[in-house]
Image (tube, coloured by chain):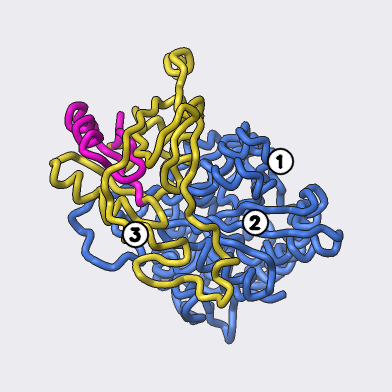
Chain colours: A yellow, B blue
């Protein structure tokens, strides 16, 4: 798909849940399906759920998000979290990236409890892609940033009405 | 310090020899380019990019000009990679030739001057980077980070590079991590989506990237993912320094962004994804508002 054919899309981040699917079915917007490195949840988990739900989606690498926001292609971001407190949410690696880019581009964010993705999906790190090791240094642990969960404060998840109308 | 990426395209025995960057880090192999069609194929298949495409263009002009013109070669290169400014390269060649100076001489003198200029650019950048410099970078700038590390060290500054892996081709992991690690330079790789986390946690304190295009208004076009990093860096008050060359007066949004075949989105994943729709703009646009200072290559100083 070409960029020009993407408009008012919904970006999803994290393991999608039944509630998330219901929301997407209600809205029927095109879904932006990022890889979600290093676990590749986009490919290994979310894609089959979107297919089963017969939702239209377009796959992309995570670093495409900036360009999609720059070109005003995203109407809403849906983040699927692990835990939630009064202060904020904890979600998979990269959730802060998705949330902050949304916030900085005045795109509203909705949060949902994440779906039940199998634990085995969360084993990979950045040194591995498609089952192949790209970093084979003996001191691999010193060579990579671990894919820890990220905390996102509530204010980061909120886009003010003023900002939204400005865009 | 050494890296084949410093000069990924060379002339040997009157033939162009191109380092196949798609095979690194697993193999270091070279492709012989004996005519313009092969040069265009090498470009299209991403066997070389960045400085490699500059050298490939210059050497193609030097070796294949007997059969055609610089303008024709320029048009062919532009058709394959519309985002890159081959017009400026063609004008450099035309300006430097004549009065007994052959295209080959002009190209050789350009390559020498280019290497000298990028060392000077690294010194200028090293002087303004913090100590320690914890540098976030993306994609690959053909060995220039080796020069930067050398200059930082000579200034007595400590440095560590944090390399964004740069999906789908993984130039960050396969090229930048590889060349830095081979030279025992402190380096760590992150997923492209971890830039915000590193910035918020104070792990990186500056950003250095390449730039495929630059304008006099400090706008840049660079590898996909650069804009997000620059935007986040601005939010966190982290300086963003793109390494630029030949800035021109142009509306950056008017430059066509190359959108690569969707199959490339699934690079290195194996499997059949022919039924899956994907989007892959190979570059993105960063407006001057998010650029702290372009570190310009000064070829004619």
State the residue in front, A103 or B109.
Answer: A103
Comparing B88 with A98, the one in front is: A98
The residue lying at 34 percent from left, 28 percent from top is A75
Going from N to C along the chain, the mark reached first, 2 or 3, is 2
Residue mark closest to the camera, 2 vs 3: 3
Checking the image for residue B293, the label placed there is 1
Q: Residue at x 77, y 49 (%)?
A: B129
Residue with the mark numbered 2? B92
The chain letter under disc 1 is: B
Residue found farthest to the right:
B155
Residue B214 lies, with reference to residue B33, above or below; the image says above
- Asked where in the image residue B117 lies, by quadrant, the reply is bottom right
Image position, residue B67 (x, y; %): 47, 71
Q: Is residue A46 above or below residue B76?
A: above
Instruction: Write down the chain letter for disc 2.
Output: B
Residue wearing tag 3: B264
Instruction: Give the structural element (helix, strand or loop) at label 2.
Output: helix
Please state the horizontal and vertical placement of residue B145, each as a whole percent of the image: 68, 62
User: Chain under label 3?
Assistant: B
Using the numbered discs, state the Cα–Cα distance from disc 1 to disc 3 in whole angstroms.
33 Å
In the image: residue A106, left or right of residue B157: left
């Amino acid at each position: 798909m070409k960029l020009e054919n993407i408009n008012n899309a919904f970006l999803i981040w994290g393991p999608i849940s039944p509630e998330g699917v219901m929301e997407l079915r209600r809205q029927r917007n095109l879904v932006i399906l990022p890889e979600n490195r290093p676990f590749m949840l986009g490919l290994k988990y979310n894609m089959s759920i979107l297919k089963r739900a017969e939702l239209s989606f377009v796959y992309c690498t995570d670093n495409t998000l900036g360009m999609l926001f720059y070109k005003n292609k995203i109407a809403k971001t849906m983040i699927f979290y692990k835990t939630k407190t009064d202060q904020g949410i904890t979600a998979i690696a990269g959730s802060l990236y998705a949330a902050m880019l949304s916030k900085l581009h005045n795109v509203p964010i909705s949060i949902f409890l994440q779906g039940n993705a199998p634990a085995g999906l969360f084993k990979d790190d950045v040194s591995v892609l498609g089952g192949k090791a790209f970093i084979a240094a003996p001191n691999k642990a010193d060579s990579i940033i671990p894919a820890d969960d990220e905390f996102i404060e509530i204010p980061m998840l909120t886009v003010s009405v003023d900002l939204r109308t400005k865009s | 310090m050494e890296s084949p990426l410093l000069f990924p395209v060379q002339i040997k025995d009157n033939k162009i020899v191109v380092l196949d960057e798609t095979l690194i880090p697993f193999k270091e192999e070279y492709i012989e380019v004996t005519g313009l069609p092969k040069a265009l194929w090498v470009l299209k298949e991403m066997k070389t990019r960045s400085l490699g495409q500059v050298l490939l263009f210059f050497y193609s002009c030097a070796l294949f000009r007997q059969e055609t013109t610089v303008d024709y070669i320029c048009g062919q290169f532009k058709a394959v990679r519309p985002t890159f400014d081959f017009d400026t390269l063609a004008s450099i060649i035309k300006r430097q030739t004549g009065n007994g100076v052959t295209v080959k001489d002009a190209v050789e003198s350009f390559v020498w001057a280019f290497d000298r200029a990028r060392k000077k650019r690294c010194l200028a950048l090293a002087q303004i980077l913090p100590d320690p410099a914890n540098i976030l970078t993306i994609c690959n700038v053909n060995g220039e980070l080796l020069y930067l590390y050398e200059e930082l060290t000579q200034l007595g500054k400590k440095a560590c590079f944090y390399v964004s892996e740069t999906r789908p081709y993984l130039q960050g992991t396969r090229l930048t991590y590889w060349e830095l690690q081979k030279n025992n330079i402190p380096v760590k790789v992150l997923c492209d989506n971890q830039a915000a986390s590193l910035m918020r946690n104070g792990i990186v304190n500056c950003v250095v990237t390449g730039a495929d295009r630059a304008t006099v208004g400090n706008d840049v076009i660079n590898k996909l993912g650069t804009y997000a990093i620059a935007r986040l860096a601005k939010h966190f008050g982290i300086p963003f320094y793109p390494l630029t060359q030949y800035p021109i007066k142009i509306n950056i949004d008017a430059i066509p962004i190359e959108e690569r075949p969707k199959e490339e989105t699934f690079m290195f994943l194996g499997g059949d994804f022919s039924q899956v729709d994907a989007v892959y703009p190979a570059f993105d646009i960063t407006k001057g508002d998010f650029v702290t200072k372009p570190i310009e290559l000064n070829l004619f100083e």
